[in-house]
């Protein structure tokens, strides 16, 4: 049974940093594609950062240079290091996983999701 459990969200002032963690179990962590998505109220989920298996990572233009996605294979944990946070980053963040690489591009190809975690950035 696939399980994804996010942690590390919270409130921070603009310019601050947070690290989101996603503890994963029940699947081949090193070979599946995974991503961080976020959702603004009334909007569709959008990809923030993603990683194909243990290979290349991609980022939304809005977070390039500020966010870093990484996989710790030994801990079966996906991370999102978020620096220089902006009020526009305020959203619910979700961890996603799927054996299909297209999960790194669109939520339609992500079968497994965490429960979501709130990130709030104040100005």
Image (cartoon, helix red, strand yellow):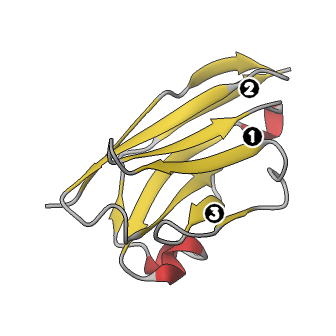
Which residue does the numbered mark 1 point to in the structure image? 89
Q: Is residue 98 left or right of residue 44?
A: left
Q: In x, y percent, where is residue 123?
A: 86, 20
Q: Is residue 74 left or right of residue 47?
A: left
Query: Foreground residue, 12 or 54?
Result: 54
Where disc 2 sits, the SS reads: strand
- How far apart marks 3 and 1 lie (CA) works out to 12 Å
Which residue does the numbered mark 2 point to in the structure image? 121
The structure residue drawn at horizontal position 13% and vertical position 61%, both measured from the top left corner, is: 1
- How far apart marks 2 and 1 lie (CA) works out to 7 Å
Which mark is first along the chain, 1 or 2? 1
Where disc 3 sits, the SS reads: strand
Which residue does the numbered mark 3 point to in the structure image? 47
- How far apart marks 2 and 3 lie (CA) works out to 19 Å
The structure residue drawn at horizontal position 64% and vertical position 37%, both measured from the top left corner, is: 81
Query: Foreground residue, 6 or 33?
Result: 33
Which mark is first along the chain, 3 or 2? 3
Q: Quadrant of residue 106?
A: bottom right
């Amino acid at each position: 049974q696939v399980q994804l459990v996010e942690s590390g969200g919270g409130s921070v002032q603009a310019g601050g940093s947070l690290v989101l963690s996603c503890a994963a179990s029940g699947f081949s962590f090193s070979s599946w594609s995974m991503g961080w998505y976020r959702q603004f109220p009334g909007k569709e989920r959008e990809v923030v950062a993603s990683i194909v298996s243990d290979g290349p990572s991609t980022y939304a233009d809005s977070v390039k240079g500020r966010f870093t996605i990484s996989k710790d294979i030994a801990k079966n944990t996906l991370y999102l290091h978020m620096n220089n946070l902006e009020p526009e980053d305020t959203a619910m963040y979700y961890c996603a996983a799927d054996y299909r690489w297209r999960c790194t591009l669109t939520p339609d190809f992500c079968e497994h999701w965490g429960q979501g975690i709130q990130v709030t950035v104040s100005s």
